[in-house]
Image (cartoon, rainbow, N blue to C red):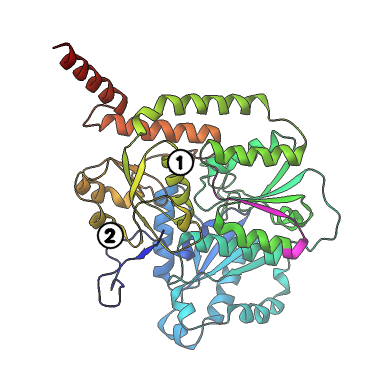
Amino acid sequence: MSIAQTGSNENGFKACVVNPLKTSPALGGALAFLGVDRSLPLLHGSQGCTAFALVMLVRHFREAIPLQTTAVSELSAILGGAENIEQAIGNIYDRAKPRLIGLCSTALTETRDEDVRGDLRCIMPRHPEWRDLSVVYAATPDFAGSLEIGWASAVQAIIDTLVEEKGPSRVLRQVNLLPASYMTPADVEAVRDIIESFGLTAIVLPDLSGSLDGHVPDEYVPTSLGGVSVDRIACMGASQMTLAIGEHMRGSAEALERRAGVPFQVFDRLLGLEAFDSFVETLIDLSGRPAPAALRRDRSRLIDAMLDAHFYFTDRTAAVALEPDLLLAVTRFLEEMGAHVTAAITTMKTAAVAKAPCQALQVGDLEDLERMVTPGGCDLVIANAHAEAVAASIGAPLYRMGFPVFDRLGAGHRIGVGYRGSRELLFDLGNLLIENRSEPAPYLRRGREAHVRAAAVDA
């Protein structure tokens, strides 16, 4: 399948984004750093760069988000921002005492091509009082990629900086889990629980289930509220295997293999029966144990749910606008249920979107989605909360998915992976199709047509 590039001018490219789908890579990098215990993301750019990311994160998770800026001014944007970095790290260390500062670049500093890594090599030795502080730098320019890429860049930077190189010795029954950027804190917790139900121990990087799961701390904490610790990250090189979710995490898994020789397996999705069966089979092989009874029960419930729901999905159409790996997971899931994705928009060309089963796929924004689908031309729209007006103009219900979801409660508590998450998503989408059905379900329509034909023969 060829992937079209959004275009309206003679060069085939759109002059500007009108109704954005894409989110900043710097935001994705900051989100990944929030999954590390006692961490504080620091965006190297203007105050406005950080303000936009902060607002998006707060509106989506409805939590206090620790996020700082180097506050690059017009002068430092021209002469260089090393002094801003040093001053920002010092202020943060004095006030918050974080264990990790995750430094993300922005378009402003990347355009100037600042050598931030070189700056850090000069800055850190000047401050022996920061010996208990780790600073990890991730290049996340706004003009390259989107949230998914920023997340992957931050995770790989953490691995390259903090994971200890390891020899052939391994910790028995220890595995690494690299979650996809679209996995909610509840998703991460559910997958980790399943891994541990096989008697395995999982080191999750990043672990949003400990930091953005909505718990209330006993006292004010100026850094992240939990997540994987720096000490645990250092031990990832001793694991038996790395399980990476989503094609965009392949680079991080390969970095772990290069650094510590940990073999890896990439799962393009954990949504749907076949996809999660593959994940469970890997856990069975790793642990040498059969699947727990509770997991087998969840699988059986998903099969029953698919039997119940397939009447309402068969031959229905959907328009989808999501990040590449989430787009692949959702379109494959809809295809397995008998629905057709007639139009899809994503943020960039990747190996994942090339495998997405869509009749028409384009890299673009939500305005492009509106142009691709005529009013009444599909039964369902799946996109983030920004697509509400687009769905209304198409005349189809919107199922909110991806980032951000700011007009519904509990975005971080949804489960959309595994047998249980697949069943919940199946029911949510199926109920939307039932509520907005203008025609009888296919099986009812076929039954009525058979009745009409029989009546005609009798006559």
Q: Earlier in the sequence, mark 2 or mark 1?
A: 1
Q: Residue at x 24, y 50 (%)?
A: 389
Residue situated in front as seen by the camera: 223 or 273: 273
Q: Residue at x 50, y 35 (%)?
A: 421
Residue situated in front as seen by the camera: 120 or 436: 436
Please tell me the numbered disc located at residue 333. Answer: 1
Residue situated in front as seen by the camera: 294 or 454: 454
Q: Residue at x 52, y 81 (%)?
A: 81
Region rendered in magenta = 258-270
- How packed mark 2 is, by other alpha carbons closer than 10 Å (few <14, some 14-19, many 20 or more), is many
Q: Amino acid at mark 1?
A: Phe
Q: Amino acid at mark 2?
A: Asp
Q: Is residue 14 above or below residue 393?
A: below
Instruction: Return the x and y of residue 319 as percentages of the image width and height.
Output: 32, 48
Q: Which residue is mark 2?
A: 368
Say which element carries label 2: helix
Q: Is residue 267 magenta?
A: yes
Q: Residue furthest left?
A: 459
- Quarter of the picture containing the C terminus is top left
Rendering quarter of residue 100: bottom right
Q: Is residue 335 above or below residue 38?
A: above
Say which element carries label 1: helix
Q: Are marks 2 and 1 in contact (CB under 8 Å)?
A: no
Instruction: Return the x and y of residue 32 as percentages of the image width and height.
Output: 56, 57
Residue situated in front as seen by the camera: 290 or 425: 290
Rendering quarter of residue 194: top right
